[in-house]
Image: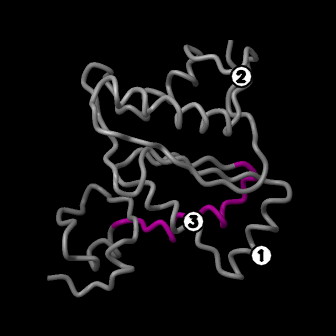
Amino acid sequence: MSNATAEEQSEFFVVTHDVTNLYDDTKVLRQKALSAAELMQMSMNISAEKQLFILDACHSGGAIETFASRGSDREKALAQLARNTGTFFLTASQNAEYANEVGQLNHGLFTYALLEILQGTARLDGDTKVTVSELRNYVEERVPELSETYHGTPQYPTGYSFGRDFPIVILK
């Protein structure tokens, strides 16, 4: 039985290669893994005006809950940043879903959909500029289609953003 609080047990962590026990030991996760709160703080400390974080991991939508829960200090910091910047987080799945891998595609469904648009095999609106919002909209529509076609287990990417949209690639 774990001594962790309910909040600690539901917190999202990016698990590093040296974490060998994921169950009943939030102490190990806190020492070795990266929490969603730490990831959000890192984004706030990065001086780049445009940021895109992509989390292709099972249950990665759990990080969005942390990003979206705002206290007054965070609210002020985000409002200040949002005036001229854009920060986006895209996750492969909701907080209680797996990020499916498909051998036939040689990738996970989320990565496959990202590559479709970034390599230009999926055109959105006829122009050659792909913005972060277009990327998000595409994977949110495409991944469920792929999960139905190849795996059968539902997978729904999600995202969180504040600030302005920005282009990430110009297709040839």
Res 3 label: none
Determine if the magenta segment contains residue 125.
no
SS class, disc 2:
strand
Locate residue 91 relative to residue 31 in the image: left or right: right
Residue 148 shown left or right of residue 3 in the figure:
right
Amino acid carrying label 2: it is Ile
What kind of residue is marked 1? Lys
Image label count: 3
Q: Is 79 above or below relative to 52?
A: below
- Asked whether 49 falls inside the magenta stretch, the response is yes
Q: What is the secondary structure assignment of the residue under circle 1?
A: helix
Left or right, 56 with respect to 69, comes to left
- Neighbourhood count class around disc 3 (C-alpha, 10 Å): few under 14, some 14–19, many 20 upward: some
Q: Return the x and y of residue 87 as percentages of the image width and height.
A: 68, 53
Residue that carries the numbered disc 3 in the rendered image? 67
Looking at the rendering, the stretch of residues picked out in magenta corresponds to 33-50
Question: Is the residue under label 2 in contact with that under label 1 (CB below 8 Å)?
Answer: no
The structure residue drawn at horizontal position 51% and vertical position 71%, both measured from the top left corner, is 37
Residue 43 in which image quadrant: bottom right
Labels 2 & 3 near each other (Cβ < 8 A): no
Residue drawn 58% across and 31% down? 138
Colouring style: one colour
Numbered label attached to residue 76: 1
Question: Between disc 1 and disc 2, whose residue precedes?
Answer: 1
Q: Is residue 132 above or below residue 79?
A: above
Q: Which residue is mark 2?
A: 170
State the separation of the CA atoms marked 1 and 2: 33 Å
* Secondary structure at numbered mark 3: helix
Residue that extends furthest to the right in the rendered view of this protein: 83
Rendering coords of residue 13 (x, y %): 38, 64
